[in-house]
Image (cartoon, rainbow, N blue to C red):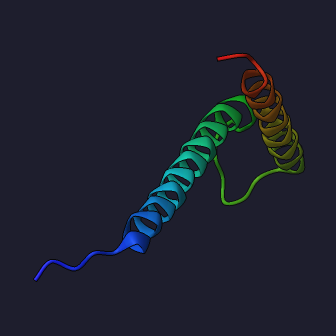
Amino acid sequence: HKIECSHCFIGFHLVFQQEKQRAMVNELVGKVTSVCWDKCVGTPGSKFSSSETSCLQYCAQRYLETSAIILRRFGSLPQ
């Protein structure tokens, strides 16, 4: 028997949106890691130096702030 479910599509859509957001976050983390690692870390050791730690924190913060500005800017453009 075929079961009609008006809530099924909404539930699927929500799960899809959550997975899409999770994928976007993972991609952003990968980009930040790659960009900031190349910029801040010399030869990796057993732990980061204080200057590497500061550089990584600042780099990640600036990257995320810049990404947010770009997203807000494109979000406000007429389609």
Q: Quadrant of residue 30?
A: top right
- Side (left or right) of 16 relative to 44: left
Q: Quadrant of residue 71?
A: top right
Return the x and y of residue 13 as percentages of the image width and height. 45, 59
Figure quadrant of the C terminus: top right
Between residues 19 and 54, which one lies in front from this camera angle? 19
Between residues 13 and 28, which one lies in front from this camera angle? 13
- Side (left or right) of 33 relative to 73: left
Say if 53 sits above or below 31 in the image. Answer: below
- Side (left or right) of 27 relative to 6: right
* Residue farthest to the top, as pictured: 78
Figure quadrant of the N terminus: bottom left
* Residue farthest to the left, as pictured: 1
Return the x and y of residue 20 as percentages of the image width and height. 49, 51
Q: Residue at x 78, y 39 (%)?
A: 64
Between residues 22 and 15, which one lies in front from this camera angle? 15
Say if 70 sits above or below 49 in the image. Answer: above
Return the x and y of residue 4 as percentages of the image width and height. 27, 75
Q: Residue at x 85, y 36 (%)?
A: 65
- Side (left or right) of 19 relative to 37: left
Q: Residue at x 85, y 42 (%)?
A: 61
Q: Residue at x 66, y 52 (%)?
A: 45
Q: How many marks?
A: 0
Say if 56 sits above or below 16 in the image. Answer: above
Between residues 46 and 6, which one lies in front from this camera angle? 6
